[in-house]
Image (cartoon, rainbow, N blue to C red):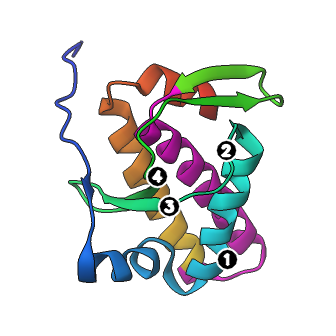
Amino acid sequence: MNTATPCFEPARVTDGYMRLRSLPALFGDDFMRAENNVYLYADRFLMDYDGGVWDFALLPSGGAFMKSAAEETWRFVNPQNHCVVSLSSEAAGIVITSLVLNHRSWMYDRHEDVELCALYCRRHRQLTDYAFAHPEAAAIFAALD
């Protein structure tokens, strides 16, 4: 039985030219709708969220996620699974982006867009793998449960 704690390598926030390429790389041709979903989900699940600047973080093993640029603690509330947790800006971004990736993968699976569905599934797996090694993994997966 392997009980070793996975080594955590932090994501890198993009800037400049890479920032412009982040959304299409993360969400494909659907990036405008998916970005809007991130903001809508943040408004729905993050208490006291009232808009703001978002960063794009590249994962060490590929993939990315969006996170609020405000380095603060967010109160995540999901009445559907009775979850109330405090999350860092990065952890909240992981949760929100994961919810959007999951939602859109199901949507494109039902609309028979094989390429976008495969992209969203791949990005979701990459983000989930990153979340397993994250210092706030327990809170992230409690929010996603």
Which mark lies nearer to you, 1 or 3?
Answer: 3
Residue assigned mark 3:
53
Q: Nearer the viewer, residue 74 or 112?
A: 74
Circle 1 packing at 10 Å, graded few (<14), some (14-19), many (20+), is: few
Q: What secondary structure is found at the residue carrying circle 3?
A: loop
The vertical placement of 115 against 1, above or below, is: below
Name the spot of residue 67 as percent of width and height, x first: 46, 52
At 22% across and 42% down in the image, what residue appears?
A: 10
The amino acid on which the numbered mark 2 sits, given as a three-letter code, is Tyr
The question of residue 108 being in magenta is answered with yes
Of the numbered discs 1 and 3, the one sitting upstream in the chain is: 1
The amino acid on which the numbered mark 4 sits, given as a three-letter code, is Lys
The vertical placement of 128 against 67, above or below, is: above
Q: Quadrant of residue 85?
A: top right
Q: What secondary structure is found at the residue carrying circle 4?
A: strand
The amino acid on which the numbered mark 3 sits, given as a three-letter code, is Val
Which of the numbered marks, if any, corresponds to residue 49?
2
Which of the numbered marks, if any, corresponds to residue 33?
1
The question of residue 118 being in magenta is answered with no
Farthest residue, direction bottom:
29
Q: Quadrant of residue 145?
A: top right
> Does 84 sit left or right of 115 as displayed?
right
Name the spot of residue 18 as percent of width and height, x first: 27, 78
At 33% across and 42% down in the image, what residue appears?
A: 130
At 42% across and 26% down in the image, what residue appears?
A: 137
Farthest residue, direction right:
80
Q: What secondary structure is found at the residue carrying circle 2?
A: loop
Residue assigned mark 4:
67
Q: Nearer the viewer, residue 112 or 54?
A: 54
Name the spot of residue 28 as percent of width and height, x first: 49, 81
